[in-house]
Image (spheres, grey):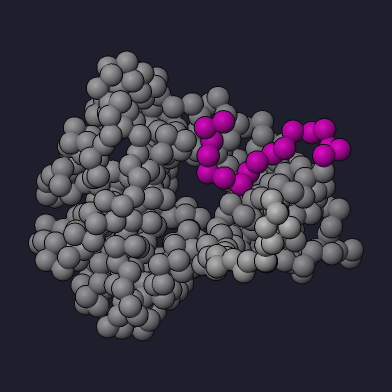
């Protein structure tokens, strides 16, 4: 009885969305949550987080004051307290087009630029725009598993091709051709590579474009780490080859300016032949943006000043620090027998370790150190160690990793 009225049990008509419940299992975030839960609260040492490509917490990796001042100026101007157009405000899109055109053999215009809440939303927008019955997409292994999570949610079939470690993680183009069929819509490449750190040559990128043209598919080029290359090969944007096959580039300010929390990225159509517009992809992108959220308007308002005024010496400083950290990490990891760069885990040298996830869980519990298991990037029994941090953290982390190895090494 309730208020004098007899009530009967109601069978509710709602329940969980299966795709949303299962999709997060493919992402880095849920794996990090599991590893964080393994930390020993009784360990008073600081946690060493060599797991995420987010060095913004470390003072040595602070963004340039020019970017900070641009945000302050945008807020104080009171010009950007309004809603943003679906595709982003015109001054910001124009600035991005001019900035990217410096590295291309043709000029982009503002209509080629779509501003998003970071590169993550750009992936969401693009895969949703490409989704149709029976569509499939070609994804790299190893790679960034948010593509898998989003493809699963949008009902796009995933087909995986290997990156070839013996060829500096180049795309296996023979495998790509064998995987593709009449329902294949796109191939994803990540350049500079995540998680492998490789940089593709212009020769290889041209072959990727020629293969895409042969198969009748577009190239999705994830370039969130653009220009953060410190090896012998310079970064070349995939858009250079947009006249061979249509290219959609995804970038953000997160990595280059070390501000992932600002959530500003862009989706760019590199398509001087107009193929994407002819086949309705542009309308699909705009259609999805019409029912999606926009990046904060004041962040957009700061973009022209950030892109125009940031000095080359800021980027040079960041790249030099990354180079030094990478060299240190590589040299020290060579002294740990159970790990080989690029970072392969040798389970045969360890006791009581089942796989890469077990390795990382026990490392978190015993050493208060978090690194990513390779399964988080599609490469089981490898490890992903991020070296973009304070040198003291890196030194301490390598020492803890070595101590962990000695504790679990097989007895001879």
- Stretch in magenta: 41-57
45 in the magenta segment: yes
Please identify the residue farthest to the front as the structure is shown. 4
Q: Quadrant of residue 93?
A: top left
Please state which of residues 391 and 106 is positioned toward the viewer in this rendering: 106
Question: Toward the viewer: 79 or 64?
Answer: 79
Q: Position of residue 92 (x, y in %)?
A: 23, 34
Q: Which residue is found at the position 13% from the left and 44% from the top?
A: 109
> Where is the C terminus found, in terms of image quarters?
bottom right
Q: Quick one: which residue is furthest to the right in this view?
A: 411
Where is residue 169? Give x, y as percent.
45, 64
Q: Is residue 347 above or below residue 385?
A: below
281 lies left or right of 10: left
Residue 47: percent from left, percent from top: 72, 37
- Return the residue nearer the eye: 245 or 9: 9
> Is 284 situated left or right of 294 in this image?
left
Tag count: 0
Specify the quadrant of the image occupied by residue 175: bottom left
Q: Quadrant of residue 397?
A: top right
């Amino acid at each position: 009885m309730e208020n004098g009225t007899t009530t009967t049990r109601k069978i509710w008509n709602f329940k969980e969305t299966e795709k949303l419940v299962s999709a997060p299992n493919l992402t880095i975030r849920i794996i990090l949550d599991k590893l964080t839960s393994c930390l020993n609260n009784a360990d008073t040492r600081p946690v060493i987080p060599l797991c995420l490509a987010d060095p913004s917490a470390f003072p040595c990796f602070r963004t340039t004051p020019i970017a900070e001042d641009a945000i302050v100026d945008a807020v104080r101007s009171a010009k950007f307290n309004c809603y943003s157009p679906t595709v982003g405000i015109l001054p910001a899109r124009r600035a991005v087009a001019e900035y990217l055109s410096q590295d291309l053999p043709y000029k982009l215009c503002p209509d080629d630029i779509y501003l998003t809440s970071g590169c993550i939303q750009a992936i969401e927008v693009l895969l949703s725009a490409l989704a149709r019955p029976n569509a499939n997409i070609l994804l790299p292994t190893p790679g960034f598993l948010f593509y898998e999570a989003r493809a699963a949610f949008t009902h796009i079939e995933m087909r995986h091709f290997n990156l070839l470690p013996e060829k500096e993680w180049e795309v296996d183009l023979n495998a790509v051709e064998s995987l593709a069929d009449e329902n294949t819509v796109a191939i994803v490449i990540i350049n500079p590579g995540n998680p492998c750190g490789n940089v593709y040559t212009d020769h290889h990128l041209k072959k990727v474009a020629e293969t895409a043209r042969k198969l009748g598919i577009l190239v999705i080029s994830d370039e969130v780490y653009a220009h953060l290359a410190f090896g012998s090969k310079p970064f070349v944007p995939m858009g250079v080859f947009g006249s061979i096959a249509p290219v959609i580039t995804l970038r953000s300010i997160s990595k280059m300016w070390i501000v992932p929390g600002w959530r500003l990225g862009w989706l760019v159509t590199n398509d001087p032949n107009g193929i994407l517009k002819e086949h309705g992809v542009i309308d699909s992108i705009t259609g999805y943006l019409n029912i999606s959220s926009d990046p904060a308007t004041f962040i957009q308002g700061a973009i022209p000043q950030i892109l125009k005024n940031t000095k080359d010496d800021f980027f040079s400083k960041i790249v030099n620090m990354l180079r030094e950290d990478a060299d240190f990490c590589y040299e020290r990891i060579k002294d740990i027998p159970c790990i080989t760069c690029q970072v392969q885990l040798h389970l045969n040298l360890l006791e009581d370790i089942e796989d890469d996830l077990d390795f990382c869980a026990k490392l978190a519990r015993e050493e208060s150190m978090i690194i990513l298991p390779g399964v988080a990037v599609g490469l089981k029994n490898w490890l992903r160690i991020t070296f973009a941090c304070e040198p003291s953290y890196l030194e301490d982390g390598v020492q803890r990793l070595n101590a962990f190895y000695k504790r679990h090494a097989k007895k001879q």
